[in-house]
Amino acid sequence: MPTFRPPRIPASEITPRSVYLRRRELLGMAAGGAALFAAHGALAAPLAAKPGPYKLDEAVTPLESITTYNNFYEFGVDKNAPSALSGNFKPRPWTVKVDGMVSKPGEFDIDQLMKDYALEDRTYRMRCVEGWSMVIPWIGFPLASLLDRVEPLGSAKFVAFETVVRPDEMPGQTGLFQPLPWPYVEGLRLDEARNPLTILAVGLYGETLPNQNGAPIRLVVPWKYGFKGIKSIVRISLTDKQPPSTWNIANPREYGFYSNVNPDVDHPRWSQATERRITGSGFFGEERRPTLLFNGYGKEVASLYAGMDLKANY
Amino acid sequence: MSSFTLPRKWQGASVWALYAVGLAPAIWSFYLGATGSLGADPVKTFERSLGLWALRFIIATLAVSPLRELGGPNLIRYRRALGLLAFYYALMHFTAYMVLDQRLDLHAVIADIIKRPYITIGMASLVMLVPLALTSNSYSIRKLGHNWNRLHKLVYLIAAGAALHFAMLVKVITLEPAIYIAIVALLLAYRPLRPYLKRRKKQRSVHQPAQ
């Protein structure tokens, strides 16, 4: 919950950006100083990618907004906590274990994965279940390519994902008030996971993923609410049972397994008919726009849900 | 009992100073929001900040009596201003929601008020604040007499509604809303305990030897 903080310097000397940085500084100091300076020094290496197959004719959200307005409760529940408090997080060395119902399980090094697959630009809409949206230029590769490599068994029906647990590096995982059970887990049906839209993202805006956006590797499923896009993945398991998902465990009435973006299925506490597009400008630049079924990706994914009651399978 | 007394000529000015200081957070965040420096989602940030300040001023209003009765300073002179500030912030909170957030989509606003319990409760609290604000002047206090006190007991319902409105909108209850709810609960629980506390205090003073 953002609160007003009285200015420490005369208003005339404040430029918008410095005010903004100061807010993060204060938060960082409150939570233990050192993390802050590391946060600003977090390395983002340039990342080359070829153009992807999907075109999106909408203004891309500024990098500043994408990297300072995050839900990543492992670092804290406030939107600016992940950017302020993720400086100590170490996204290297990193491996992703892929196991379960597969012929060739393995543990894959992140740098090797990034060499093995042709990285693509994938600019997607991102709709948060809270009612706001962005347009994010991800860099990544189709999850299907990794799945093909491990050869799922015929009995595999679902894919389960798991986020890293590192209380020493993730301050939201320590303390008395733990908002969610760790590790954060998510899941997809195998056909959803294999859909060409579904990617494992390793970068955005031409650089490797910042810590606050789920470094070094995260899931992006653009037709589902943002919380399905599990971050900092350490394990992917193929299974024949519908896997648990963290928000569904926390509040099963409000967050279903599917969580497809749908303007006609309201969240029990708020409407999902429209969304605020984050544009990085002031009050008067922000716009409210209608939310699209499957976040506008119906052409690609509607067939996955043919004949399904989307209200019952929210 | 300690007393909080300013020189007489400063007393009126101090109330006006409270209004000025009290409204500063709204003015400051409006300025930040209008100039694009209130973060990535300025509308939500502004809206929530106004709502939180409304709740803070309701808490401050409710804290005046217990503070005095439990031996703290007597701030009764400032209670009207604190209550009105709560009303102003609640009104600005609703205006920000309707104008900046919902872009004057009255259909959506009305649907929200009817269908979303946390908005229904928040709206009810704002509506109940209106008669209190309208009768906050000295004329009404004189005119309404005993009924004024009865009417202004609504503030307890408003406080409970505001705390509930806050608690119901968060995705998970974290420390911050938990603290606000606890403070409001304490302030409300104090009222039924009050006669008992007063009796004890009286007894204690009776038993003390005269000096």
Image: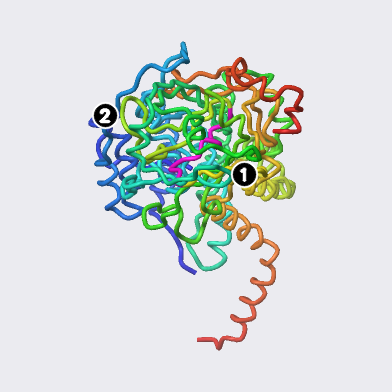
Q: Is residue B135 visible?
A: no
Q: Quadrant of residue B178?
A: bottom right
Q: Quadrant of residue A62?
A: top left
Q: Say if the magenta span includes residue A228.
A: yes
The residue that appears at 26% across and 39% down in the rendered structure is A43
- Image check: A80 left or right of B147? left
Residue in the foreground of this view, choosing between A210 and A117: A117
Which contiguous range is marked in magenta? A224-234
On the image, the x and y values in percent for residue A134 come to: 47, 24
Say which mark, if any, is on residue B167.
none
The residue that appears at 40% across and 54% down in the rendered structure is B6
Q: Say if the magenta span includes residue B89.
A: no
On the image, the x and y values in percent for residue A144 come to: 51, 30
The residue that appears at 59% across and 44% down in the rendered structure is A101
Which residue is labeled 2 in the image?
A: A46
Which SS class for mark 1?
strand
- Looking at the rendering, in which quadrant would you find the C terminus of chain A? top right
Q: Nearer the viewer, mark 1 or mark 2?
A: 1
The amino acid sitting under disc 2 is: Pro
Say which mark, if any, is on residue A239.
1
Instruction: Mark 2: give few (<14), some (14-19) or many (20+) Cα within 10 Å.
Output: few
- Image check: B103 left or right of B27? right
Q: Residue under mark 1: which chain is it in?
A: A
Residue in the foreground of this view, choosing between A110 and B144: A110
**What whole-number distance in Å separates the C-alpha atoms at marks 1 and 2?**
36 Å
The amino acid sitting under disc 1 is: Thr
How does the figure colour the protein chain or chains?
rainbow
Q: Is residue A188 visible?
A: yes
- Image check: B12 left or right of A192? left
Residue in the foreground of this view, choosing between A212 and A303: A303
